[in-house]
Each structure stands twice: as structure tokens, then as C-alpha cells.
């Protein structure tokens, strides 16, 4: 895979970013890349200006806001050793645009507190960016245990090189994890006529053999049976002290989202563990 040289750090300067920035600095340094702080100023008025407000006043207010933003970013740049930039408009659209125009290799976004649903903008960036996105959940700097999840499809395995890159850069252990969901509650014996009834233990054994063959560089290979793949991943990562989850997504809608993206989307939204999302091309 391509090296992760240019790392965009999406920041909301209205929030307390100390822990997020310390974590981001740790990631940038261990990847031996260059960090770029980027903030988007929401366009409050858009194309509409109230009739009783003079255009000159709006322009002055915007310029004042820009000066304040640049001052804050400049101070943070000096403290953390990052470059910085800012823009005005729709936050996630401007972030995606900046990624494309500046050859960004990785994005770090603040996903907030563990187990809480992440904000709309961070969620959209994770779904729409063409580069890997690391969704931070309050976590001390350090990656010692990485959980790489797979549904064993060829497409999902496109994120495996990214998991290996982080394993090697951070000197971490890497566990590959697969969840088998049994079909329950939908069919009775008569409705299953003509549909093969699988032996879950046999499926588990087969999946494990496949994983050991495909993912030889992993330290551990684990298959779990769970009613919900997303919930099983979230709980397994939390209970076993993983520092990072690596997953694939496609960032699309409709049927493809149902088939490929729903698990990743739920894990990103509610995980207690930082999640590194790699978009399927």
C-alpha cells in the first residue's frame, strides 16, 4: 500500500481538543508523516443575508472570525508541529475537497467519547473520504493491540495491507476477527425446505482454516458466533483491550450499503475503541 505521508487532522476549535491532538501527534510521529490541522468555518448566512444587515457588516464579521480561527490554528501549529489550513462552507464537503486537492493519505477525525454516537460531520467524512479515516474515541496515545475485522470477502480484504502497515509501524500485535451470524427467528423447519441448514461449528472451523491461510502475518485468528456482527465486534474489542479496530467500507448507499456498509457504520458510530476505516474502491 502507499505510505501514509500526509495526514489531515480535522479539528473543531470550539471544543477541548487536547486529548485528540495528543493522540493525533502520536499517530503522525509513529507513521513518520506530516500532520495538517484543518478547520472548516460553517457558512452561517450561506447565500442569504437578512435585509436589515449591511453586506459590509457581514464581511467584517467573517474577516474577524477568520482572523480568530487563524490565530488559534497558528498557536496549535506551533505547539504540535503541524501545518494548518482552514476554509468556509459545509464541513464534510470541504474536508473531502481538501483531501482530493492536497494528496492526503490519511484523515483523523474526532469521534468523541467511547460508546457514544459520533457527530454527523465525522460520520460523513468516514463514509465519503477516498482515503483511510481514523475515527478517534477518547483513548490515550498508544497502539499495542490491533483488531482487523473481515467478512472473508475479497473486497473486505483490501484493508488488510493497511492493518499490516499499522502493525509494523506501531510494533503492535494483530488479531484477525470474523463473526458468523446464525439465522434465527425468521424461519421454521417447513420454511427452510430446499435451503441448506448449516452446521455453525463446521462453518467456524472452515472460516478459521481460511483465515490462517490468508492472514499468516497475524498473531491470532478468531472466529465468533454472534447474533449481531457489529455488536460482537464492539464488545470483543472493548472486553479484550484492543487499541484500534481496522475495517472496510464502501461509502455508498442503497443495496450496497445494506450488504457491505451497515456493520462498519454501526461500529464506527458506537465503538468504544478507535476505528480505522479503509474505503473499498
Image (tube, grey):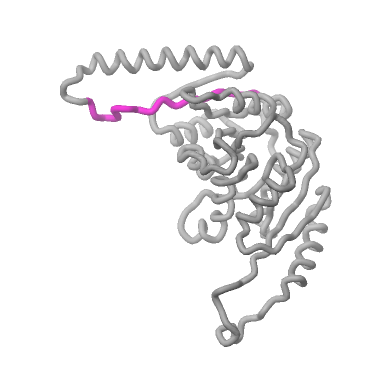
Position of residue 16 measured from the top left corner of the image (x, y, whole percent) = 53, 24
Q: Quick check: 261 above or below 83? A: below
Query: Which portion, as a residue range, is magenta?
Result: 34-49
Position of residue 197 measured from the top left corner of the image (x, y, whole percent) = 67, 79
Q: Nearer the viewer, residue 105 or 226?
A: 226
Q: Can you tell which quarter of the image residue 212 is in?
A: bottom right
Residue beneath the point at 52% across and 49% down: 251
Can residue 250 be seen here? The reply is: no
Q: Would residue 45 be counted in the magenta stretch?
A: yes
Position of residue 115 measured from the top left corner of the image (x, y, whole percent) = 58, 43
Q: Is residue 59 left or right of residue 189?
A: left
Q: Quick check: 88 above or below 1? A: above
Residue beneath the point at 63% across and 17% down: 80
Q: Would residue 194 be counted in the magenta stretch?
A: no
Residue furthest to the front: 239
Quarter of the image with the N terminus in it: top right
Can residue 168 be seen here? The reply is: yes
Residue beneath the point at 48% across and 23% down: 13
Amino acid at each position: 500500500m502507499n505510505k501514509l505521508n500526509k495526514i489531515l487532522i480535522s479539528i473543531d476549535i470550539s471544543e477541548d481538543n487536547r486529548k485528540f491532538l495528543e493522540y493525533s501527534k502520536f499517530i503522525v510521529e509513529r507513521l513518520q508523516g506530516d500532520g495538517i490541522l484543518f478547520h472548516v468555518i460553517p457558512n452561517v448566512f450561506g447565500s442569504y443575508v437578512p435585509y436589515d444587515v449591511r453586506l459590509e457588516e457581514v464581511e467584517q464579521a467573517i474577516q474577524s472570525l477568520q482572523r480568530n480561527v487563524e490565530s488559534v490554528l497558528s498557536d496549535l501549529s506551533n505547539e504540535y508541529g503541524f501545518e494548518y489550513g482552514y476554509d468556509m462552507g459545509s464541513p464534510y464537503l470541504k474536508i473531502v475537497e481538501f483531501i482530493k486537492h492536497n494528496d492526503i493519505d490519511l484523515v483523523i477525525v474526532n469521534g468523541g467519547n467511547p460508546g457514544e454516537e459520533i457527530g454527523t460531520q465525522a460520520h460523513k467524512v468516514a463514509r465519503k473520504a477516498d482515503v483511510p479515516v481514523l475515527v478517534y474515541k477518547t483513548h490515550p496515545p498508544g497502539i499495542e493491540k490491533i483488531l482487523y475485522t473481515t467478512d472473508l470477502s475479497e473486497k473486505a480484504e483490501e484493508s488488510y495491507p493497511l492493518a499490516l502497515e499499522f502493525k509494523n509501524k506501531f510494533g503492535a500485535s494483530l488479531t484477525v476477527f470474523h463473526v458468523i451470524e446464525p439465522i434465527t427467528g425468521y424461519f421454521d423447519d417447513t420454511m427452510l425446505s430446499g435451503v441448506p441448514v448449516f452446521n455453525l461449528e463446521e462453518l467456524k472451523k472452515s472460516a478459521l482454516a481460511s483465515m490462517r491461510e490468508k492472514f499468516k502475518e497475524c498473531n491470532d485468528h478468531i472466529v465468533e458466533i454472534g447474533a449481531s456482527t457489529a455488536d460482537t465486534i464492539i464488545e470483543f474489542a472493548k472486553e479484550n483491550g484492543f487499541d484500534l479496530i481496522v475495517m472496510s467500507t464502501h461509502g455508498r448507499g442503497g443495496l450496497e450499503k445494506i450488504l457491505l456498509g451497515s456493520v462498519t457504520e454501526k461500529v464506527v458510530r458506537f465503538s468504544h475503541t478507535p476505528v480505522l476505516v479503509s474505503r473499498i474502491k
